[in-house]
Image (cartoon, helix red, strand yellow):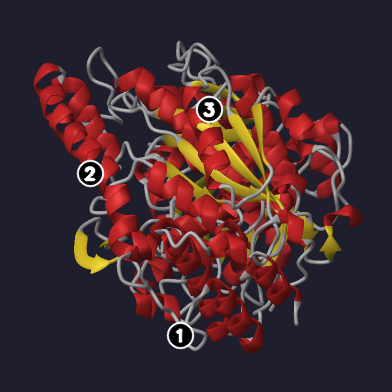
């Protein structure tokens, strides 16, 4: 027999009580193994082992109304071990959660039917290999990359604390929910989970509970191949309340630990649960089956040990759905009904706050939110876009109270501090300025978690450090979150800090992420439009790319208005008739090509300048608009950007050229670097003339 079969037989005593609880747990197990077997792909072991954990959390603790999966004050359940997705899908199915469609309306259908479970990992199914937010009702965040869900959960817990501080009033606990997370050894190995846990401990987020499935098994074998620390002691050092459950099947001990979590008010809770992957009791030994189906023979033997019909597939015994859904509804529905009634009274007593609550939950912005966005006067000396970005951000923040975020220990440099916003800290959860510390990866994951709770969240650091947070940026794009990632120090303009701090390939890698709007504005008024675009975008993330060095503020009475940023690219300056040459730039190079334009124009050259701050937005325009900006007949095109050349061929074509970076930077004053790498007025004019002379 396989190990899975041996373990099942060894633990038959766990199934002899005949209770509906045990029947439901075994239903979760058999649904998981059947779905994985039918797909011939997936991970059956963890869902089988954690079925008692999932059942206990959902049936006895989770505050959730299956008929209203978008109830704002519901508890959150995050399956950070996303490879165990069949555990979550089985819970969603048995809980009878109703589907919410893409328009936010109830469809009248179950979120997951039995047929949906049978379509596990198949094309166009609602049950993909890893849980996907927006794709499947009941999934709170997209998990797959280990540690990501842990980081998101900290953002969710932070959001609850801020929302409670801002909206709650005496007798009106609008927000008081908890966040439950199931995580595993892989999560504990990933640095992002450690970063997030450190943040959560510092902030004393007592509404956060991680249940750690300590099964000592990973893809390559036992975790002792690479991982043998005492994780509980690590979390004690982070400031968490650490509890232990020696057997995942001991639902009484698990419930007692969760009761302790509910009673803890000064720190997050970390529950270490011992399990054996593939089934249950740690006494049974190790389990080898992890990332593959068990096989028909092993499944039959396991079902026999459960007292299950051996040939039955996707069996849900009579009474299981009713009991499980009933337990969740009996707790969640009255709580949700009372909440709705409370909000109606709240509207009468606090109409302004209620209006803000409605706007936030519908992902819209208050009327007049952009009324105070500054207009910048022409200025040859100009201002760094990080500085103008800070001014614009603060103008928006004054009108949008739920614009909240911070930096990875760089607020004085990124200029992202909200004036008079206060710091979000334990004991002062109303602060709007987050202090993420030097933890870029978890900052991104936490920002995503905050956005999942309808906050307009942002995180800031230097552009070169986007390397550390690419995963959460990518996940924000997959989930279609309105998160904002502010990246300053965007080029070799960093100067003396040298190549370790000078981004080269980073714009190309961000632009490569589908659904991410990467905007590199060229002056202060383009910055204002870039922030306007970011604030309005609730269904996709935005990366704002700002400079350290001053950028001249262009004279908009002479050049086209900066509102063209909304279309991604626009004609900044033009000539009569068809141009002989098009100069294209973004960011700090925009004023450079504008100066070159003036020189060439004075020499009688027919030249056009195109500002192209957002490739994402430009590609969304229709063919006629793109042709009006970059006509196909004009093949002599020169793009100038202090970054790598990858991607520019799309816009300059075979006959075009770029002045870009083909190496890493160097440590020197900015002017010396501009001379060295060709980002000067004289060089742009020289290359342009060479192109014009070429037949």
Q: Residues within 10 Å of mark 3 (few under 14, many from 20)?
A: some
Q: Residue at x 49, y 82 (%)?
A: 122
Q: Which of the 4 image quarters holds residue 150?
A: top right
**Under tag 2, what secondary structure?**
helix
Q: Which of marks 2 and 3 is nearer the N terminus?
A: 3
Does residue 292 show up? yes
Q: Which of marks 3 and 1 is nearer the N terminus?
A: 3
Front residue of 85/260: it is: 260
Contact, CB < 8 Å: mark 3 with mark 1?
no
The quadrant in which the N terminus is found is bottom right
Contact, CB < 8 Å: mark 1 with mark 2?
no
Q: Residue at x 52, y 79 (%)?
A: 34
Q: Which of the 4 image quarters holds residue 169?
A: top left
Front residue of 420/234: it is: 234
- Horizontally, residue 338 falls left or right of residue 147, namely left
Q: Which residue is drawn at 73% across and 51% down?
A: 185
Distance from disc 3 to disc 1, alpha carbons, whole Å, reads 39 Å
**Which residue matches tag 2?**
333
**Which residue matches tag 1?**
312
- Horizontally, residue 269 falls left or right of residue 359, namely right
The quadrant in which the C terminus is found is bottom right
Does residue 585 show up? no
**Under tag 1, what secondary structure?**
loop
Front residue of 137/294: it is: 294
**Which residue matches tag 3?**
260
List the single residue furthest toward the left: 348
Q: Residue at x 39, y 76 (%)?
A: 116
**Under tag 3, what secondary structure?**
helix
Q: Position of residue 220 (x, y in %)?
A: 83, 66
Q: Earlier in the sequence, mark 1 or mark 2?
A: 1
Q: Where is residue 440 in the image (x, y as percent from the top left)?
A: 68, 37
Q: Which label was assigned to residue 511?
A: none
């Amino acid at each position: 027999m396989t190990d899975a079969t041996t373990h099942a037989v060894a633990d038959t005593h766990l199934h002899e009580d005949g209770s509906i609880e045990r029947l439901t747990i075994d239903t979760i197990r058999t649904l998981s193994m059947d779905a994985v077997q039918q797909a011939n792909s997936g991970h059956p072991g963890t869902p089988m082992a954690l079925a008692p954990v999932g059942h206990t959390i959902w049936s006895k603790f989770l505050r959730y109304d299956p008929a209203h999966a978008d109830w704002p004050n519901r508890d959150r359940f995050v399956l950070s071990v996303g490879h165990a997705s069949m555990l979550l899908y089985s819970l969603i199915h048995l809980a009878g959660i109703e589907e919410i469609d893409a328009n936010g309306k109830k469809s009248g259908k179950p979120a997951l039917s039995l047929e949906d479970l049978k379509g596990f990992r198949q094309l166009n199914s609602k049950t993909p290999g890893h849980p996907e937010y927006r794709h499947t009702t009941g999934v709170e965040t997209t998990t797959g990359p280990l540690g990501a869900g842990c980081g998101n959960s900290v953002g969710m817990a932070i959001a609850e604390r801020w929302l409670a501080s801002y909206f709650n009033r005496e007798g009106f606990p609008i927000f008081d929910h908890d966040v439950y997370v199931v995580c595993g050894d892989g999560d504990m190995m990933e640095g992002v989970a450690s970063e997030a846990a450190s943040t959560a401990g510092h902030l004393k987020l007592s509404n956060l509970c991680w249940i750690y499935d300590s099964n000592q098994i990973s893809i390559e074998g036992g975790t002792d191949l690479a991982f043998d620390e005492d994780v509980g002691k690590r979390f004690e050092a982070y400031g968490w309340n650490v509890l232990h459950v020696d057997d995942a099947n001991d639902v009484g001990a698990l419930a007692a630990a969760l009761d302790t979590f509910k009673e803890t008010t000064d720190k997050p809770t970390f529950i270490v649960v011992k399990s054996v992957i593939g089934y249950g009791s740690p006494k049974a030994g190790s389990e080898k089956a992890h990332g593959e189906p068990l096989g028909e023979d092993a499944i039959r033997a396991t079902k026999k040990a459960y007292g299950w019909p051996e040939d039955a597939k996707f069996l849900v015994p009579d009474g299981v759905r009713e009991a499980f859904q009933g337990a969740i509804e009996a707790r969640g529905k009255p709580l949700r009904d009372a909440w709705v009634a409370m909000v109606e009274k709240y509207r009468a007593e606090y109409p302004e706050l209620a209006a803000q609550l409605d706007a936030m939950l519908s992902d819209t912005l208050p009327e007049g939110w952009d009324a105070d966005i500054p207009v910048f006067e022409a200025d040859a000396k100009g201002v760094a876009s990080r500085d103008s970005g800070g001014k614009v951000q603060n103008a928006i923040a004054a009108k949008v109270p739920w614009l909240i975020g911070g930096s990875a220990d760089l607020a004085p440099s990124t200029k992202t501090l909200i004036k008079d916003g206060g710091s979000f800290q334990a004991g002062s959860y109303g602060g709007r300025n987050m202090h993420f510390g030097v933890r870029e990866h978890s900052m991104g994951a936490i920002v995503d978690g905050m956005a999942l709770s309808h906050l307009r969240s942002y995180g800031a650091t230097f552009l070169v450090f986007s390397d550390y947070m690419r995963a959460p940026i990518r996940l924000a794009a997959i989930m279609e979150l309105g998160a904002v990632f502010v990246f300053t120090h965007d080029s070799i303009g960093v100067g003396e800090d040298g190549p370790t701090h000078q981004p080269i390939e980073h714009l190309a890698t961000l632009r490569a992420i589908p659904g991410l709007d990467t905007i590199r504005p060229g002056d202060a008024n383009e910055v204002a439009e870039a922030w306007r675009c970011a604030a309005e975008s609730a269904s996709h993330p935005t990366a704002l790319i700002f400079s350290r060095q001053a950028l001249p503020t262009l004279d908009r009475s002479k050049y086209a208005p900066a509102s063209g940023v909304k279309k991604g690219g626009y004609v900044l300056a033009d000539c009569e008739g068809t141009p002989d040459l098009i100069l294209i730039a973004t960011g700090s190079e925009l004023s450079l090509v504008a100066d070159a334009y003036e020189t060439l124009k004075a020499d009688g050259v027919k030249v056009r300048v195109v500002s192209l701050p957002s490739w994402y937005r430009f590609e969304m325009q229709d063919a006629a608009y793109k042709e009006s900006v970059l006509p196909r007949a004009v093949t002599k095109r020169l793009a100038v950007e202090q970054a790598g050349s990858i991607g520019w061929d799309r816009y300059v074509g075979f006959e075009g050229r770029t002045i870009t970076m083909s190496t890493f930077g160097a440590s020197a004053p900015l002017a010396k670097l501009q001379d060295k790498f060709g980002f000067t007025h004289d060089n742009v004019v020289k290359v342009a003339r060479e192109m014009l002379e070429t037949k």
